[in-house]
Amino acid sequence: MSINIVDRRNGPKGKSSENRQRLLKRIDGQIKKALPDIVKNTNVKDLTSSKERVNIPIKGINEPQFTYDKDSGDKKGVHPGNKEYVEGDQIQKPKGGGKGSGKGKGSNDPATSEDDFTISISREEFLDYFFEDLELPDMVKKHLNSIVDFKQKRAGYSNYGNPSRLNITKSYKNSMARRMAIGMYFDKKIKDIEDKLKTDLSDDIREELIKELDKLKKMKIGVSFMEDVDLQYNNFEKVAVPTTSAVMFCILDVSGSMGEKEKDIAKRFFMLLYMFLTKQYEHIEIVFIRHHTSAKEVTEEEFFNSKESGGTVVFTALELMNKIIKERYASNWNIYAAQASDGDVWDRRDAFECYAILDKDILEMVQYMIYIEINRPIEGDLWNSYKILSDKKKNFEIGRIDEVSEIWQVFQNFFKKKTKNG
Amino acid sequence: MDKEHIKKLFSKSDWTDETIEIADEIVSKIAKDYLQLDTYPNQFEIITSEQMLDAYSLIGLPISYNHWKFGKDFAINSNNYKKGRMGLAYELVINSNPCISYNMEDNTTCLMILVLAHAAYGHNTFFKTNYLFKQWTHADSIVDYMLFARDYISKCEEKYGYEAVELTLDACHALMNYGVDKYKKPHKISASEEQERLKKEIRR
C-alpha cells in the first residue's frame, strides 16, 4: 500500500480570512467603546505627540474560562528545597483568602491589567477612529490653497550639482563605460600596429611604429578614472504644494475659581480640538491666551502650568484675541477659537461687553468658536448672554462639562456630522 | 530497490515525492512487520507556513465554523511567528480515517522522514488503538461531522443573525474544555496493594 501524498501548497490560502474579518469587526466596536476611556485616562498630549503607534487595550475579546479558585480548596504539594515541611503537614490559609481580588468580571477599574489584549494601530488610523463620526461644521474651509508651501521632489539626474548630491552608482557606471569604450579604441589601434609590426617593414617605419605603439600604450594607461562628464548628480525640483492652514485660539480662564480639575478638563478639551484640526489642516498655529482680570498671550508651557490667579474679566481676553487676529491673521487664515471658563464673571457688564465684541467683530472673522463652561452649578451671566449669541450665530456653540468623562460626549456634540436637512 | 539510488535520494536535503514514497515503504515495513502497529491509511499533505498558521488557528481541524476567536488566534500566532518568537510545528496530525497529516514544505529530507515515522505511524497508531480515542472519537466520520457542524452554524447565522450565534458560541467556548468527562484518574494504591500487584506481575 503506497502512501497518498497530497500537495496543498497551491491550494486555497487564507482559510481563516473570514475569521480575521470577524475579529476586525469585533475590534472595531471595541475601539470605539474604548475611546472615551482613552480621553479620560491617557495624557492626551501623548497622543498628539508624533508617536508612531497607539496602543489600545481591548477588553471585549478575552475568552473567559473556568478555573479553580486559587484561594480556596485543599491543595497538597511539597515544594522542593524546603527544610521545614514534609508532606501531610498542615499550614494556615493566608488571611483574607477566599475573597477574590475582584480583578476579573465586574471590576470597573479602567486601568488595564497586563494580560489584556492590546492592539497597536498607527496614529493615523487611531485618529480616524477617534474622529470617525465627526466633521467640521457645515462650513467651507474659507481659505483653501491659501498658503503655498514648497516641497523638494526628485527629478532625475543632472550633470551639475552640489557634491553632496553626487550619485556614486550612476557616476561610476558612466566612468566604467567611458573607460571601456576608450580602452577598446586604444586596444584596436595597438593591435593594428602589432599586426603591422609582424610583417616585413623597413627599419625606419618599424621604429616609428614602435614609438607610436609606446605612445598608445601610455595613453591607454593614462585614461582617467573619473572625468567631469561622468559625474551625475541627483536632481531635485521645487514643487509648489497648496496647503490649508488654520490658527486656533485657546482662551483659558485662570482666575482663582478655576481649580486644577477645571484646568485639566479644559486642557484635554483643547488637545482634542487641536488633534481634530490637525486632521483637517496641514498647518496649524495655536495662540494661547489666558486671562484673569487681564489677558496675556503665553506659551503652551505657561498656558497649562500657570500659577497665577485673580479675579475674572473675560472681555480682556476677547479684546486681545481680536487684536491678534487683526494684526497677524487678518487674511488667508482659517480661524478657530475655543474658550474655557467656569463662567464666573465679575459683573454683568463684562458679560455684555463679551457679547458685543463677539457679535460685532470676532464672529465675523472666525470659522467656528466654541465656549465650554466647566463645573458651574448654575447658569451665570456669561452663559446666558452666550446662549442668546449661539442661537443667533451659526458659528458659535456652547457646552458644559462637569466631569472628565463627559468631555468626549460634549466634543462629539459639537462636531457631529450634520445631516443635510438638519 | 536500488540501494545506491536510495542512498543518493536520502543524502540530499531537498525531497521529492519519490523520497517520501520510498521512505514510507521502509518506515511502514518497520512499523507493520517489526513493531506490529495497527494504523489508519495515511494521507500525507504538504502545506506552506501560512497554511500551517491557518491550521493552528482552527485547533488543527481541517474544517471549522467561522468565529472571531479563530481570527484572534491566527493574529497572535502569525505575529509571534513573524517576529521570531515562535517556530511552527513540522507536522500536524488529525485523528481521522484516513489519517491526515499536514507537513511543512520546508522540512528537510531528514525531517520529512522523521515526521513520517512520528506522525503518519506514531500518532496514527495511537489514534487508532488508544482506548479513550476509541471510546470518544469516530475517526471515520470526524471530517463529515465538522462539515455538518460548519453548515449547521452558518444556517443558524442566516436564521438568527450572526450576533446571536456569536453570543451563544462565546458561551460554548467557555465550556469547551468541560464537554466530556474524559478521564477519571484511578485512585492511588497503597504500598501493600502495590506489593501485591508486583507479586502478581512477577508470577505471570
Image (cartoon, coloured by chain):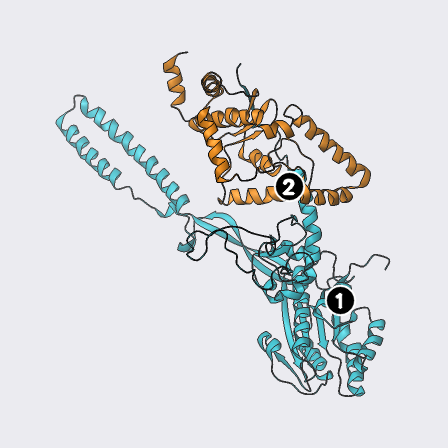
Q: Is residue A404 left or right of residue B204?
A: right
In which image quadrant can residue B141 be found? top right
Q: Which residue is mark 2?
A: B177
Q: Amino acid at mark 2?
A: Asn
Q: In the rendered structure, the residue with mark 1 lies on which chain?
A: A
Q: In the rendered structure, the residue with mark 2 lies on which chain?
A: B
Dot 2 alpha-carbon crowd within 10 angstroms: few under 14, some 14 to 19, many 20 or more: few
Q: Could you tell me which secondary element the residue under label 2 belongs to?
A: helix
Q: Position of residue A166 (x, y in %)?
A: 41, 51
Q: Is residue A352 left or right of residue A87?
A: right
The residue under the point 69% across, 53% down is: A30
Q: Amino acid at mark 1?
A: Val
Q: What label sits on residue A410 in the rendered view?
A: 1
Above or below: residue A189 compared with residue A350: above
Q: Could you tell me which secondary element the residue under label 1 belongs to?
A: helix
Q: Which chain shows up in orange?
A: B
Q: What label sits on residue B94 in the rendered view?
A: none
Q: Residue furthest right?
A: A421
In which image quadrant can residue B4 be found? top left
Q: Which chain shows up in cyan?
A: A
The residue under the point 68% across, 54% down is: A31
Q: Position of residue A259 (x, y in %)?
A: 67, 80
